[in-house]
Image (cartoon, helix red, strand yellow):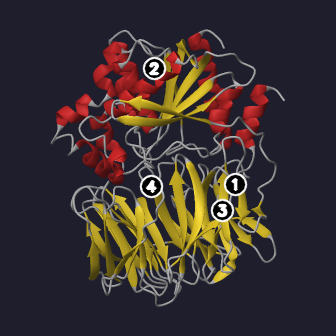
Amino acid sequence: MKAEERWQARFRAPRVTLPTWARQAPHRAVYRGTASGCWEIYAWDRSSGQTRQVTDRPHGTRYGAIDPTGQWIWWFGDIHGDTDGDGHGVWSRQPFHGGPDVPLAMPPGHPCGLALASDGTAAVGRSSRDGFEILLARPGNEPVTVYRHDEYAAVADMSLDGSLIAVNHSEHGDVLHPAVRVVRANGSTVAELNDGPGRGVTGGRFAPVPGDRRLLVLHERRGRREPLVWDPVTGEQREIWLRVRGEISADWYDDGRALLIIHNQRGRTELLRYDLAGGGLTPIESPHGVIEAAAPRPDGTVEYAWSSAAHPPVVKSSNGHVVFSPGRTPPPSVPLEDIDVEGPGGRIHALVSRPERVAAPYPTVFLLRSGLPGFGGGPGGQDDDSFQPQVAAWVDSGFAVIRVNHRGSAGYGSAWREALRGEVGHIELADVAAVRDWAVERGIADPDRLVLAGTAWGGYLTLLALGTQPKSWAAGIAAVPIADHAAAYEDEAESLRAAHRALLGGSPAEVPERYAASSPITYADMVEAPLLILTGANDPRCPARQVEHYVRALADHGREASVYRYDTGPGTPMVEERVHQMAAAIDFAVRAIGGV
């Protein structure tokens, strides 16, 4: 198989997420998959083995859920067909075995969480220019608002009986360090958990047992994210402290007597069982790599979605069996190398993928990730050892790929993640520069053939680097980037506005100098390298208008960018569109550096 055929086969191979089953009907499950050529919602009857495509929409479907009884499948989208893909719509539900969609009778907005009770009640979070609200929708009744605020808020979960709703919020003005409030179905407050400035508290799931009030929460009291179990009625808290490095999250076992611990360290994942009665910790065998999602089954086994840089994704069980196979397996890729580089703020962990049958120093792509989970792109997140078709495509095309877990990344403790305050963008790029210099000095990267590329926040950093480090890069490729923070703020979704205020210390009207100092458009006159920008017409994360401002600013200084425009909104859910964009990026990079 030729290199181009091989990397395209990875994109086109069908993929699935970890199936989510109904808590009271575990033989019924939903998942997202790409069998249709686009990410859509599917129903899976595990007792019969039958699957059914639930949604079929022009730009795919990003959010789906199943209610605890397994009677209804919920999905989010534009009730008019989502022809623009801007992520603005309402939740609808459909019977598990098929039937007409029933949209919620509520104004369209951007999704901010969904939680479902066993009696059919739904707690729905939405945002609009009017702020954030959480509505309670009981079967046969109009939705009623139980919470509203101008600052960010989202549904975390609802107890199985529908009596308690957990809300993650930032009424204090810092969405990066939220608090959690538990309210009753009438909106009255039961309890609040807020650890104060600089310490986030994030609500997870209620115990999956009828009448159980305990809520899993992630806190940062010891300089990293760790779980605790909280009873909001009595106020009792139990912190789960483990003598391991890295960061920890958790989920409930089905009987509420144990926790599944998901331990992340240096871009790899391991699973453990923590028994609440005695505090015993039992490792769960899994391959070396990354577990993107995991959940215990009622029989005590654990199912998980796993991959590594070299091995394509698979949904497996702790009993050793493959749980679900979406079809043909994509070609494998090369394994990762870990490197550690001393940087201006401490030791930086980075990942290197080397091309086969090519001699060093390599033409090298520094691939910057999209960023913050939950906000569609920002600092945060982590580059890891999971299977990434775009990384493998660059490697197959003869490039080395280096990914940097710079300051602002998750997985290395709160202090590393918090280090961006004051110089957003410039701090991350100082770490990228340190790794770039290291790779050149070690003879890994060819200094004359260095390409910087990224999507969303990674695209933003790419543009900023081309203007602030113009001599360092031979070419730049920025997909759906932030080019002008102030202009992006005017057009983006409310949750992203909240993230901008938290990162930069206020709105553009309050701290205009910070928005300017961190915006690529400020440095447009310094750009020298060839540049490709990929921009979506309806993306609320990285609005198209501010990209057009940046392109005009380049032109005003006698510089030109190649622009690839497409019609979809957040992300690129259509497989063939992703293939076209990857081909355009590789072709541009090869031409910019004079061949591989």
The residue under label 1 is 287
Q: Is residue 572 above or below residue 339?
A: below
Q: Residues within 10 Å of mark 4 (few under 14, many from 20)?
A: many
Q: Amino acid at mark 3?
A: Tyr
The residue under label 4 is 88
Gap in angstroms between the C-alphas marked 1 and 4: 39 Å
In front of the other: 219 or 388: 219
Mark 3–mark 2 contact, CB under 8 Å?
no
Gap in angstroms between the C-alphas marked 1 and 2: 33 Å
Which sits earlier in the primary sequence, circle 3 or circle 2? 3
Q: Amino acid at mark 1?
A: Pro
Q: Nearer the viewer, mark 3 or mark 4?
A: 3
Q: Residues within 10 Å of mark 3 (few under 14, many from 20)?
A: many
Q: Position of residue 279 (x, y in %)?
A: 50, 77
The quarter of the picture where residue 10 lies is top right
Give the left or right position of residue 292, taking residue 159 as reference: right
Element assignment for label 3: strand
Q: Residue at x 64, y 16 (%)?
A: 360
Element assignment for label 4: loop
The residue under label 3 is 304
Q: Position of residue 489 (x, y in %)?
A: 30, 42
In front of the other: 513 or 199: 199
Which sits earlier in the primary sequence, circle 3 or circle 4? 4
Q: Nearer the viewer, mark 1 or mark 4?
A: 1
Q: Is residue 402 above or below residue 58?
A: above
Q: Nearer the viewer, mark 3 or mark 2?
A: 2
Q: Nearer the viewer, mark 3 or mark 1?
A: 1
Element assignment for label 2: helix
